[in-house]
RNA sequence: CGGGGCGUGGCUCAGCUUGGUAGAGCGUUGCGUUCGGGACGCAAAGGUCGGAGGUUCAAAUCCUCUCGCCCCGACCA
C-alpha cells in the first residue's frame, strides 16, 4: 500500500550507476536546422551549472508544475502535474498520520486578531506576515466598488493555526481522559512574504499541520520525536531524499515553541532546505488559551502541546534533490505516472496494431498496480515524446513497436540510465510476459538509486571544518556545503557567522545524525564547544 | 521593504536611443509526406506592446504614476 507498485528487492540490473552528479543529457544530438536558424527555442532548460535559480524556474515551467499567479502577488497556480505530486505526498503522509493515531479535522481560515496577541512570542514572529480581513461586503457607487462594513474586530488569514486550535482545544479538553488529543489539519495558509519563489516560499501555500495535546511534557516530547521520525521516513522512503535531523537554535525556533526539531535536506547547489518541522510547544499555548485538564490526582493542569508540519515546498525539495538538465526526475513513489508507453509505427495498419497492443499492455500493467500512460498522439514523432515525458520526470518509458510485437518484448528506458559504449543512454529489452513484475523491480531499483545518489552527493559535499579561514572558503561567493563545525552556543556568534558568510546553523544534530559528540573550540570565537553543529546556506 | 534587471501572440526575443500605428523563430490549427531520440513542405490563425494618466497631428517607442515577475540583500516553511 505504501508504494503504487509491487516491491521486488534484489540486485539492480545495472549494478552501480556511474554518473552520480552529472546529467545524462550529453548524448543529445545537435539538430540539423541548428546551423541555420537561431536555435533559441532549443534552450528550454538552463543548465544547472550555468544558473541554478534559472534552471529551477525553467523546470517548473517545462514540467508543467506551476506558474506565478501574477494577478495575486506572491501566489502560485499549482498546475495538474505539480498538484498530482502533492496528492501523492498527501496520500502517503495521511496514511502515516493515521497509523500513528491522528485524526483529521478542519478549523477556520480566519482567526480573530485578538487570538494572535495571546502568545507574546507567537505574535512577534508572525505579525509582519499577516494578511488581515477588515471589512465585509462591497458597495457599488456608479459602478465603482468600495468596502462596505468595517468589522468590529479584524480577522487574520491564518499564517498557522496554533491560536485558533488552542481556543477549541480549551473547549474540548476537560479531563485527562480526553488526552492525548491527536489532530491533523490539511489546509492552506497565508504569509505575506517579501520575497517569493515558486513552491519554496509563496504567499499562500498548502500544508498539513498536526496539533496535539498531552497530559505530560514527556508524552508531548515523545510525540514531537515520533512525528519527526515520520517525516524523516517519508522523506527518505518516498521522496528518496536523505535528511539530517536535529534541534533548531534559539534564533531559528518556531515563534511560541519551547523547542523546534527539523529535518534538513541538501539541494544540488549545496544549500539546505528545511523539509519538515516538529515543535514542542510546552505549555505556552495551553496557558495563553487556558487549555486545562483535571489530572488523575484531581488537580487542574495546563496541557502540553505539540505541532508539526510539512508543506508544498517539498515539491521544490524533490526537484532540487533529483532533477537534472533534462528536467524533473521523480522518485517512482511520488510519480503520478510510473510508466509512459510510446507506440511506434510507420503505416496506418501498424499504427492501429501497435496502439491496440499498447492500450492492452497498459491495462495489464494497471492491474499490476502501475500508473500507466499511453502517448498515442499522432501529431508528434516518438523522439519528441521522449523528451516531453523526461522533462516531466516520468521514471520509466516503454517503447512499443512492430519489432517488439513480433518478439513479444518491449524496450524500456529509465529516466536516468547509464550510457552505453556509444555514449547513448542504455535501453533494456524486457519480455512482455511478466512485464508488470519486471517493471515493479525496475521502479524499486530506480527509487533506491535516487536515494543512494542523493546520499552520495550529500556525503561528497559535507565537510568537517576547524579553521575560520576554511569555513569562509567553503561559503565564499555562491558556494555552500554542509559543514560540521564547533560553535560556542551563543546567538552573538551565530549572527557573526551569518553576517560574514550568509551560512546559518541548520540544526544541532540528534545522536546518530552527525559526527559523534566531541568537545572542541568554536570555529569563529575560539570559545569552548560541546559538539559540532550543521552549518549551511539555506532556502 | 531597500538596490538592480525585466514586462511586446502559448514560449524565447527583436523593434524603443533617432515617435509614423507591430515583427522573427519555436509552438498552435489544417492538409500531405513522415514516425525505433527534439521531422519536413504548403496554407492559416493568434498581440488594444502589463495597466492608468500625460506630451504630441501621431506613442510599443518620450514623461509620470502604478501592478507584476526575476536577481541581490534584510525578514521568514
Image (cartoon, rainbow, N blue to C red):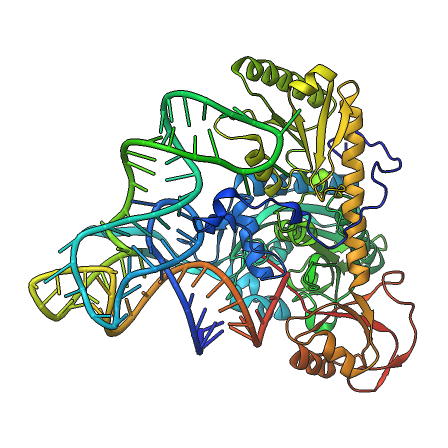
Report if residue A463 is visible in the image: yes
Identity of the residue drawn at 60% across and 24% down = A344
Instruction: Name the one closer to the observer, A456 or A382.
Output: A382
Residue at 68%, 76% in the rendered image: A476
On the picture, is B28 further left or further right than A390?
left
Q: Residue at x 69, y 50 (%)?
A: A322
In the image shown, does A275 or A141 lie closer to the viewer?
A275
Residue A18, horizontal then vertical, whole percent: 80, 49
Say which quadrant the C terminus of chain A sits in. bottom right
**Closer-to-camera residue (A423/A191):** A423
Label tally = 0
Asked if residue A227 can be seen in this view, the reply is: no
**Where's the N terminus of chain A, which quadrant?**
top right
Asked where in the image residue A456 lies, by quadrant, the reply is: bottom right
Query: Residue A287, image x and y in percent?
Result: 69, 64
**Quarter residue A167 falls in:** bottom right
Q: Residue at x 70, y 72 (%)?
A: A504
Vertical comparison of B35 with B20: above or below: above
Q: Residue lying furthest bottom in this view?
A: A526
Question: Measured from the top left, where is residue A369 in percent x and y?
Answer: 73, 26
Q: Quick check: A394 above or below A56?
A: above
Q: Estimate the x, y position of residue A266 in percent, counting from the top left.
A: 73, 59
Amino acid at each position: 500500500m505504501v508504494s503504487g507498485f509491487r516491491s521486488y528487492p534484489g540486485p539492480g540490473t545495472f549494478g552501480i550507476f556511474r554518473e552520480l552528479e552529472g546529467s545524462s543529457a550529453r548524448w543529445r544530438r545537435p539538430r540539423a536546422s541548428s546551423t541555420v536558424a537561431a536555435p533559441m527555442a532549443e534552450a528550454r532548460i538552463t543548465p544547472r551549472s550555468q544558473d541554478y535559480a534559472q534552471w529551477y524556474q525553467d523546470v517548473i515551467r517545462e514540467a508543467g508544475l506551476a506558474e506565478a499567479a501574477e494577478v495575486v502577488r506572491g501566489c502560485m497556480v499549482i498546475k495538474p502535474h505539480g498538484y498530482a505530486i502533492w496528492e501523492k505526498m498527501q496520500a502517503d503522509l495521511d496514511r502515516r498520520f493515521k497509523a500513528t493515531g491522528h485524526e483529521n479535522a478542519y478549523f477556520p481560515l480566519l482567526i480573530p486578531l485578538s487570538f494572535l496577541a495571546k502568545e507574546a512570542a507567537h505574535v512577534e514572529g508572525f505579525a509582519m506576515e499577516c494578511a488581515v480581513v477588515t471589512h465585509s461586503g462591497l458597495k457599488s457607487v456608479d459602478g465603482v466598488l468600495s468596502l462596505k462594513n468595517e468589522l468590529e474586530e479584524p480577522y487574520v488569514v491564518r499564517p498557522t493555526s496554533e491560536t485558533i486550535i488552542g481556543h477549541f482545544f480549551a473547549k474540548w479538553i476537560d479531563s485527562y481522559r480526553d488526552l492525548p488529543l491527536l489532530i491533523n489539519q490539511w489546509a492552506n495558509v497565508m504569509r505575506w512574504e517579501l520575497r517569493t519563489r515558486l513552491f519554496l516560499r509563496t504567499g499562500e501555500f498548502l500544508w498539513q499541520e498536526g496539533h496535539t495535546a498531552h497530559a505530560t511534557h514527556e508524552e508531548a516530547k515523545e510525540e514531537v520525536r515520533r512525528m519527526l521520525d515520520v517525516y524523516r521516513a517519508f522523506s527518505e522512503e518516498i521522496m528518496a531524499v536523505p535528511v539530517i535531523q536535529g534541534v533548531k537554535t534559539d534564533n531559528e525556533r518556531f515563534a511560541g515553541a519551547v523547542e523546534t526539531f527539523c529535518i534538513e535536506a541538501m539541494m544540488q547547489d549545496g544549500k539546505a532546505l528545511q523539509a519538515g518541522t516538529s515543535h514542542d510547544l510546552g505549555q505556552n499555548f495551553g496557558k495563553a488559551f487556558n487549555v486545562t485538564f483535571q489530572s488523575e490526582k484531581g488537580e487542574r493542569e495546563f496541557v502540553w502541546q505539540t505541532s508539526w508540519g510539512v508543506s508544498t515546498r517539498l515539491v521544490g525539495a524533490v526537484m532540487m534533490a533529483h532533477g537534472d538538465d533534462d528536467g524533473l526526475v521523480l522518485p517512482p513513489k511520488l510519480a503520478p505516472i510510473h510508466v509512459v508507453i510510446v507506440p511506434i509505427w510507420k503505416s496506418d495498419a501498424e499504427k492501429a496494431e501497435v496502439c491496440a497492443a499498447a492500450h492492452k499492455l497498459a491495462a495489464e500493467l494497471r492491474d499490476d498496480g502501475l500508473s500507466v500512460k499511453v502517448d498515442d498522439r499522432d501529431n508528434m514523432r516518438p523522439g519528441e515524446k521522449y523528451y516531453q515525458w523526461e522533462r516531466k520526470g516520468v521514471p520509466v518509458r516503454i517503447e512499443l513497436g512492430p519489432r517488439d510485437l513480433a518478439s513479444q518484448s518491449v524496450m524500456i528506458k529509465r529516466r536516468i540510465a547509464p550510457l552505453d559504449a556509444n555514449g547513448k543512454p542504455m535501453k533494456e529489452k524486457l519480455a512482455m510476459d511478466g512485464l508488470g513484475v519486471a517493471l515493479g523491480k525496475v521502479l524499486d531499483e530506480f527509487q533506491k538509486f535516487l536515494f543512494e545518489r542523493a546520499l552520495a552527493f550529500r556525503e561528497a559535499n559535507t565537510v568537517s571544518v576547524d579553521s575560520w579561514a576554511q569555513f569562509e572558503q567553503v561559503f565564499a561567493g555562491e558556494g555552500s556545503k554542509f559543514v560540521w563545525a564547533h560553535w560556542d552556543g551563543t546567538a552573538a556568534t551565530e549572527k557573526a557567522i551569518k553576517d560574514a558568510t550568509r551560512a546559518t546553523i541548520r540544526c544541532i544534530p540528534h545522536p546518530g545524525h552527525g559526527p559523534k559528540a566531541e568537545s572542541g573550540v568554536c570555529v569563529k570565537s575560539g570559545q569552548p564547544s560541546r559538539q559540532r553543529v550543521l552549518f549551511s546556506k539555506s532556502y
